[in-house]
Image (cartoon, helix red, strand yellow):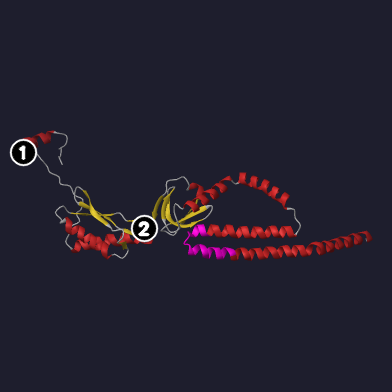
Amino acid sequence: MKDELRALDETRSALIDLALLYGPRVLAALLVLAVGFFVGRWVGQALDRLLARLELDVTLRSLIRRVVRLLVMLLFAVMALQNLGVDLLPLIAGLGIVGAGIALALQGVLGNLAAGLLIIFTRPFRVGEYISIVGEEGVVVAISLFTTVLGHPDRSRVVIPNRKIVGEVLHNYGAIRQLSLAVGVAYDTDIGAALGVVEGVLSRNPRVLQEPAPLVRVSALSESSVDIAVLPWVEIADYGAAAGELNRAILEALRDKGIVIPFPQREVRLLGDCPAQEDADRGSPGRRNRT
């Protein structure tokens, strides 16, 4: 019993000695880390405001802010370790070995990281632009170091790994898109009047951009109609709504002007009504019609 009490007293004494020896150093190291956290956040915010005045891309601003904040915190962490008396050379060597192993295990993740840096610095697209890539399309909602997020009109989101984007054919629509509408009018219609009606509809719709100017032209001479292509430009957010509004407005405007939108039709003529031909038709398995 006395031996156990003696061992307990020795342990307590050793802990008290360690606390007196290293306690102030530990407290100072924690204080340095806390100061580093707040200093890093302040420097990051100040740098972000400066970059915003330079009108730098928001994704690149975010990357620079995070890197600078991380470097500031890393500097304060080194100061804290030095205050504790830690030898940094063996620690750096050990971290290098561990980092090599992690790099081998996370090749896909590092590939996304490298691709993300390439996207951020080359900027083939930006947040808010409409793109089509690897079979997906949508508005770019966010660009991070590892993924790119696209938003769909149905409010769903598609997350694409950055390594799937680099090296692929990219279709960047930018901030506006061109609608591709069509309407057919009868062959006896005054084409100039029909084009004027469509152009008037486009000029009155607030969603249609006047610069670049919308295109209205005869696109084809079909079997039963003269087809008019209607190609206006609209903002990305108005793309879905504008198509429905314009189709309805064009239909109503053409009806008001008495311009006919013909149904698909085909004229069929029956030839050979003479008696000799009728006798021949009766003897044949089936009467042949020519169209």
Q: Tell me which residue sits at (70%, 47%) in the image.
A: 93
> Magenta segment: does it hold 44?
yes
In terms of image quadrants, where is residue 238? bottom left
Percent x, y for residue 190?
Answer: 15, 56
CA neighbours of label 1 inside 10 A, class few (<14), some (14 to 19), many (20+): few
Where, quadrant-wise, is the C terminus in this rendering? top left
Q: Is residue 179 above or below residue 283?
A: below
Q: Amino acid at mark 1?
A: Cys
The residues colored magenta run 43-61
Q: Is residue 261 left or right of residue 165?
A: left
Q: Tell me which residue sits at (84%, 64%) in the image.
A: 16
Q: Is residue 76 above or below residue 134?
A: below
Q: Is residue 49 left or right of residue 234?
A: right
**Residue positioned most to the left:** 275
Where, quadrant-wise, is the N terminus in this rendering? bottom right
Q: Which residue is mark 2?
A: 176
Percent x, y for residue 36?
Answer: 65, 63
Give how far apart the Cα atoms at labels 1 and 2 are: 64 Å
Q: Nearer the viewer, residue 157 or 284?
A: 157
**Residue positioned most to the right:** 2
**Disc with the residue nearer the chain's start (1 vs 2):** 2
CA neighbours of label 2 inside 10 A, class few (<14), some (14 to 19), many (20+): some
Q: Amino acid at mark 2?
A: Ile
Query: Which is closer to the viewer, label 1 or label 2?
Result: 2
Residue 79, disc: none
